[in-house]
Amino acid sequence: MRVSLKDVAAHAGVSIKTVSNVVNNFRHVTPAMRERVQRSIDELGYRPNLTARHLRAGRTGIIALALPELGNPYFAELAAAVIDTAADHDYTVLLDHTGGRREQELLVSQGFRARVIDGLILSPIELETEDLRDRAENVPLVLLGERDYDLPYDHIAIDNVAAARAAVRHLVALGRREIAFIGARRGRNEPAQLRVRGWREELAAAGLAADEGLVAATDGWGHADGAAAMARILDDGKRPDAVFAYNDPMAIGAMRVLHARGLRVPEDIAVVGFDDVVEGRFGAVTLTSVSPDKGAIGRLAVESVLARLGGDAPEPRRIWADYRLAERESTLGRHAAEGHENG
């Protein structure tokens, strides 16, 4: 039998309104009263009807999250952060996979799910500013990622140039001088462009030449792409003493090739990735990586959508999330990394 607010109120000896205030987390309920009602909720096993609550507010209780590649560990971890935060606010997340294709990103951004969602969090790859400027849908939109859109939408990102410079600075400080970059994109890809720019700027700041022959372009961003890019650099007769990869899967692919060629990481070639996915922390050689605060990105995205729905959001703004460089064995070596950064 379903337990109602009336049942909880009778059990706790309070009014239905008081129970409702506790369930909806209203602030003016005293701690003693909140504890009393919560005890009855727990004892009776009451579960609020979230669907009815959202419908009374004219909402569906669903937020859409559209990502370019669900198989990419970074996006999988980011999705988990969004889902967890949404659940804290009694929202369900509907996942859309765009594949980084413009036509799919257009379909999502123009509101083909508008009747079933309250807001959209979108990580675009191929959309242009004009595509989003013409957006007619009123569902709140929050953008993720490093594409630069001069538009009135909240946009959450990290500073890719500064993060890339931090990675290269780390390698230079370790005495590395021939630093390759793998993962420059043949097509337009703003994050890749920004990370290459950071690579160039930090080399210049260190008084080192940026050898464009050490920049390997790829069509994709997976393990195989990183392996192929690393093999291509070595086959061209290049012997860098460090590699900075566009992301962790590419760095892991590169390390596999280095191992197959008899090159040691980091003794012969140090490797740095980007995104700090779980996989990189458990390999035979743990991976040094730029670590965006994925939890904060997910939280900020959901909270931005809900603030728009509540009508109490500030002017649309670009929100910079934090990052750090997680230093591990692929640059420090096993002994130096022990006790320094293992997770």
Image (cartoon, rainbow, N blue to C red):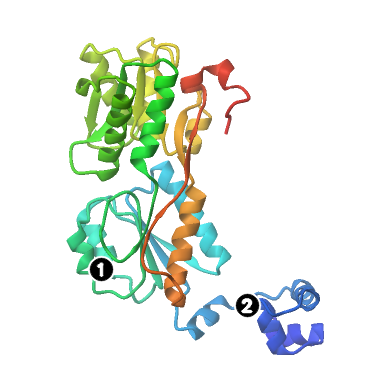
Depth check: give the residue in front, 260 or 317: 317
Q: Amino acid at mark 2?
A: Asn
Q: Which residue is mark 2?
A: 24
Mark nearer the N terminus (2 vs 1):
2
The quarter of the rendered structure image containing the N terminus is bottom right
Q: Is residue 68 above or below residue 315?
A: above
Q: Position of residue 7 (x, y in %)?
A: 74, 85
Residue at the image position 30 percent from the left and 20 percent from the top: 207
Disc number placed over residue 340 in the picture, else none: none
Depth check: give the residue in front, 164 or 208: 208
Q: Helix, strand, or loop for circle 2?
A: loop
Q: Amino acid at mark 1?
A: Gln
Residue 311 figure quarter: bottom left
Asked if residue 176 can be seen in this view, the reply is yes
Asked if residue 82 can be seen in this view, the reply is no
Residue at the image position 82 percent from the left and 87 percent from the top: 13
Q: Is residue 176 above or below residue 8?
A: above
Residue 317 figure quarter: bottom left
Q: Position of residue 158 (x, y in %)?
A: 39, 47
Q: Helix, strand, or loop for circle 1?
A: loop
